């Protein structure tokens, strides 16, 4: 395969139909225009990033191969066929980026990143509608009918992929069905449409379709393998499928060989490596570790968890700076800070968490202290009443923001009722509830059992969880938290969240890149 790749390039394959592909570009530019400045700008942007043009190239090569007379492949029907399949592909990529919440496409901002998702969906729909309208107005109904079926296959493949991810039912057969519908079907139609455009026999059209489908299956499998290679080799981000929660053939092959005992062995080894006092210094938990008293730890821990997003070094540095703003006495400051002392917080900032947010959070904690005896007592009491961490999270957020505050600060405390992963709250509870004698977590809140905790899910834990087959859901939301925690409970029902050290520690150390 390597020798073949070195001998024949894509440019070599494209060379016989270079003129036809140039004619296609001119044809598309003439046909695809839009009214209105915004839509025109969006359309030009989408068409300028069409990529390698594999599908129209297949159309033209197939037309040239099956043309009864020389030059027939350069006709308008072949050009129309190439346009039909290529525009379906362009629209599907726009919709894919919206579904995957992708920010980049071929090194440029995706349409949804540049114009927001709802406009990107409209753009994709417009391209599909315009494509079919041009085809129908041409009167070439056989070509339009032939190509249209691939659009339904693309949608079926996307739904099947989501269904398998949500239900944890991805198998090799399901994977093959998905890539057939999402990739191979359109490549198959590309090859057969070229033959149909030049009047080839039914058998020739069918043969070309099977050829294109085989190319499509091989193409997608190779692309999925390349996702696990270093970025420098491909020009694309490594492990992107993992980040998006896509279970592909390479991962399925690994998981086939990975028994539960092997997964447990790896998790235990990583847990032992990271659940040590040496972990504290470079982690946000170092902020509450400055203090010996329970209330000081509760308040310092809550603030450290609140700002725990972005660069880890910056989080730790700004967490310690926040404590200095409170005279290194967080409990006393929350209870007794004067208006002048509260005003002195205005100079504080960590990313979008500013001094005004800090002031409102201090006052909310003061109210929590006055009404409920402190944040720890609130969590313990409400858990004993509900026996549900999700219910406590929802109650806590409502209670926390029940006093006067600037609406903007609400974004700093995730809402489980909106499906958020609540990573920072889950991490905070891990700190305060877990006790295993290792000296990292505090074990202050003894009225909440460790078995009730949920994994703090972020990019690192999510990617590692998917790599180990613990998580199949794409989004890092509360449903993903529940799925990952349920998987970890199979290994340690009494303390599943101790594997946070395994997943997060390995993730930040680049375990997946090794």
Image (tube, rainbow, N blue to C red):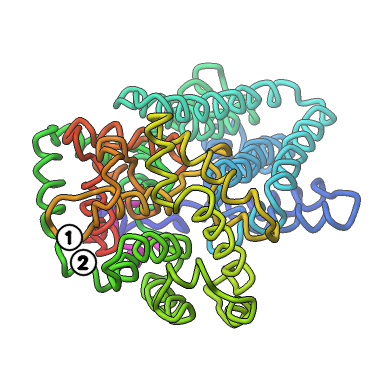
Indicate whether 349 appears above or below 402: below
Secondary structure under badge 2?
helix
Label 2 neighbour load within 10 Å: few <14, some 14-19, many 20+: some
- Residue at image position (40%, 75%) is 329
Q: Residue at x 20, y 30 (%)?
A: 490
Q: Is residue 267 left or right of residue 129?
A: left
- Name the foreground residue: 14 vs 264: 264
Q: Earlier in the sequence, mark 1 or mark 2?
A: 1
- In the rendered image, residue 287, in percent from the top left (x then y), is placed at 34, 70
Q: Is residue 337 visible?
A: yes
Q: Is residue 7 magenta?
A: no
**Foreground pick, 394 / 85:** 394
| Residue under the image location 21 percent in, 52 percent down | 502
Q: Nearer the viewer, residue 166 or 60?
A: 166
Q: Circle 1 — which element?
A: helix
Rendered residue at 36%/35% (across/down): 472
**Residue at numbered disc 1:** 274
> What is the magenta range?
227-235
Residue 155 location, x and y as percent? 57, 27
Q: Are marks 1 and 2 in contact (CB under 8 Å)?
A: yes
The image quarter in which residue 207 lies: top left
Residue 312, position as x, y percentages in the image: 37, 70
**Vertical comparison of 432 with 201: above or below:** below
Q: Give x and y (percent) for residue 32.
A: 80, 47
Q: Nearer the viewer, residue 254 or 422?
A: 422
Question: Relative to 340, is 217 on the left or the right?
Answer: left
In screen coordinates, is 210 left or right of 264?
Answer: right
* Inter-mark Cα distance, 1 to 2: 6 Å
If the image is split into quadrants, where does the C terminus sit? bottom left
Residue designated by label 2: 279
Task: Say few, some or many: other residues with alpha carbon within 10 Å of mark 1 (under 14 / 14 to 19 / 20 or more).
Answer: many
* Residue 71 seen in render: no
């Amino acid at each position: 395969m390597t020798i073949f790749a070195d001998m024949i390039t894509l440019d070599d394959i494209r060379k016989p139909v270079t003129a036809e592909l140039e004619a296609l570009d001119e044809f598309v530019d003439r046909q695809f225009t839009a009214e209105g400045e915004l839509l025109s700008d969006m359309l030009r942007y989408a068409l300028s990033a069409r990529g390698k043009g594999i599908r129209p190239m297949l159309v033209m090569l197939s037309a040239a191969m099956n043309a009864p007379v020389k030059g027939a492949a350069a006709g308008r029907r072949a050009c129309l066929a190439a346009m039909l399949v290529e525009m379906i592909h362009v629209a599907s990529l726009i919709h894919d980026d919206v579904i995957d919440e992708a920010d980049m496409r071929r090194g440029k901002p995706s349409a949804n990143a540049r114009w927001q998702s709802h406009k990107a969906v409209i753009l994709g729909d417009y391209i599909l509608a315009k494509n079919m309208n041009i085809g129908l107005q041409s009167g070439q109904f056989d070509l339009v009918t032939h190509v249209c079926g691939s659009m339904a296959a693309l949608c079926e493949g996307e739904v099947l992929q989501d269904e398998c991810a949500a239900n944890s039912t991805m198998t090799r057969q399901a994977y093959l069905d998905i890539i057939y519908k999402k990739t191979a079907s359109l490549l198959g139609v590309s090859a057969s449409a070229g033959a149909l455009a030049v009047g080839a026999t039914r058998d020739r059209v069918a043969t070309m379709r099977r050829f294109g489908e085989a190319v499509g299956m091989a193409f997608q499998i190779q692309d999925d393998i390349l996702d696990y290679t270093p970025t420098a080799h491909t020009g694309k981000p490594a492990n992107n499928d993992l980040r998006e929660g896509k279970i592909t053939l390479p991962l399925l092959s690994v998981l086939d060989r990975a028994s539960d005992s092997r997964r447990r062995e790896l998790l235990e080894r990583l847990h032992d490596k990271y659940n040590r006092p040496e972990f504290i210094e470079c982690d946000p938990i170092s902020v509450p570790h400055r203090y010996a008293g329970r209330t000081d730890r509760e308040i310092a821990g809550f603030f450290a968890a609140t700002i725990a997003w972005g660069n880890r070094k910056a989080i730790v540095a700004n967490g310690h700076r926040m404590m200095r703003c409170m005279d290194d006495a967080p409990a006393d400051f929350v209870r007794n800070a004067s208006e002048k002392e509260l005003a002195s917080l205005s100079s504080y900032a960590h990313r979008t968490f500013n001094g005004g947010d800090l002031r409102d959070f201090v006052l909310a904690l003061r109210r929590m202290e006055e009404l409920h005896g402190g944040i720890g007592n609130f969590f313990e009491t409400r858990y004993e009443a509900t026996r549900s961490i999700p219910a406590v999270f929802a109650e806590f957020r409502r209670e926390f923001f029940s006093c006067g505050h600037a609406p903007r600060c609400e974004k700093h405390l995730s809402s489980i009722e909106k499906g958020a992963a609540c990573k920072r709250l889950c991490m905070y509870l891990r700190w305060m509830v877990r006790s295993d004698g290792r000296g990292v977590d505090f074990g202050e809140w003894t009225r909440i059992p460790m078995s009730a905790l949920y994994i703090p899910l972020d990019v690192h834990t999510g990617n590692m969880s998917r790599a180990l087959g613990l998580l199949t859901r794409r989004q890092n939301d509360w449903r993903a938290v529940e799925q990952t925690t349920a998987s970890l409970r199979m290994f340690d029902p009494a303390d599943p969240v101790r594997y946070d050290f395994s997943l997060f520690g390995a993730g930040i150390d680049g375990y997946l890149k090794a």
